Amino acid sequence: MSAWNTLLVEQEGPILWVRINRPEVMNAYTNEMGSELVRAFGMADSDDSIGVVVLTATGRVFCAGADVSAGAGAFDTESGEGAKNFGARADGARVDSNFIKAMMNCRKPSLVAFNGSAAGVGLTLTLPCDIRIAADNARFGCVFTRRGLVPEAGSAWFLPRLVGLATSLKWCMTGALVPASEALAAGLVTETVPADQVEARARELALEIASNCSPVALALTRRMLWHFSAEAGPQGALSVDAALNIALGAKGDVHEGVAAFLEKRQPAFPLKVSADMPATPWWPEDPTGGYGDTK
């Protein structure tokens, strides 16, 4: 695979492992990391041999947040020192670091394996992913107000949908770190395990998904849940789910899924996401509305 500067990206069977890899600075986020996340999730989306993405990190911390090595001007990307980590490249070109758009548009399920604590953008960059598990000693922080900032990466939309408004307000208004047990109770993560078992559990869950589920059905289900759960009523979902199931019912994946069930064996679904996805005109080309795009 192509060279990576801030990530380790490797494929293991149907799993694409995407590991944040700046352990010497607690995996602090930079614009370059954002652009590499865009590339990694784009790779997963276009490659039919990849069934699931697992996002994790090297070292003891998942991501401590944005890189503030530039000092007090770390977030001043126009006139201050922050241009080094978050501005244009040295040659003046802008890079596409809109990882939110890339994650939302990726048609493969994505898991987050929090091997350690996550704060600021280290937490919010995981919110567009589908399933999060965490080390039981991890802590999580929406620390923006403590830095004079507001929640970014669309987290004012994502976080209340995941943990509710009351919890979101508490976490964002205090900016305090919360333990994994509180994150589990709130629904930010679906389970916690000992730190030395996080990767093994993520692999187990990813393989369960990839081995048993139709890639096309997964891609459609992912888009339906993210899109229609934000609507005020079920009308939008009702307008597409019956038609999709009628169309899918005539295709090979449903035939194979039923046959595998009746024959008590693993399915071998024939349809490919790259070639056989039904149209989803209700899914916007840019589900983020263009926010955060730095191309």
Image (tube, rainbow, N blue to C red):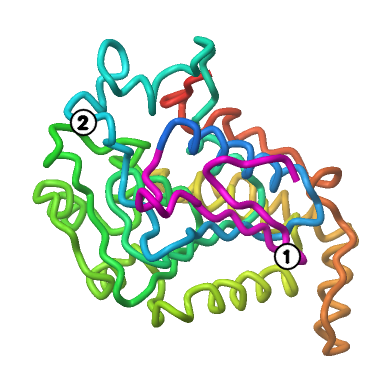
Residue shown at the point (75%, 64%) measured from the top left: 14
Direction from residue 9 to residue 48 in the image, left or right? right
Label 1 vs label 2, nearer the camera: 2
* Closer to us: 199 or 154: 199
Any magenta on residue 140? no
Q: Tally the marks.
A: 2
Residue placed most toward the observer, 59 or 289: 59
Where residue 150 appears, as percent x and y from the top left, is 20, 34
- Give the percent coordinates (x, y) of residue 275: 86, 43
At horizontal 34% and vertical 56% (from top left) the residue drawn is: 162
Residue at the spot 49% in from the left edge and 53% down from the top edge: 129
Residue count near mark 2 (Cα–Cα under 10 Å), binned few <14, some 14–19, many ≥20: few
- Whether residue 172 sits left or right of residue 281 in the image: it is left
Residue 80 figure quarter: top left
Q: Is residue 161 above or below residue 15?
A: above
Of residues 19 and 234, the one drawn nearer to the viewer in this rendering: 19
Disc 1 residue type? Glu
Residue at the limit of the structure toward the front, as seen here: 24
Q: Which residues are magenta?
A: 1-29
Residue at screen point 26% across, 59% down: 140
Mark closest to the chain's N terminus, 1 or 2: 1
Q: Mark 2 belongs to which amino acid? A: Gly
Dot 1 falls on a residue whose secondary structure is: strand
Give the residue pinned by disc 1: 12
Assess whether residue 23 is covered by the magenta stretch: yes
As rendered, which of 71 and 188 lies closer to the eye?
71
Q: CA distance from mark 1 to mark 2?
A: 39 Å
Q: Is residue 166 left or right of residue 215?
A: left
Q: Is residue 286 above or below residue 105?
A: above
The residue to which callout 2 is attached is 71
Image coords of residue 280 (percent x, y)? 68, 38
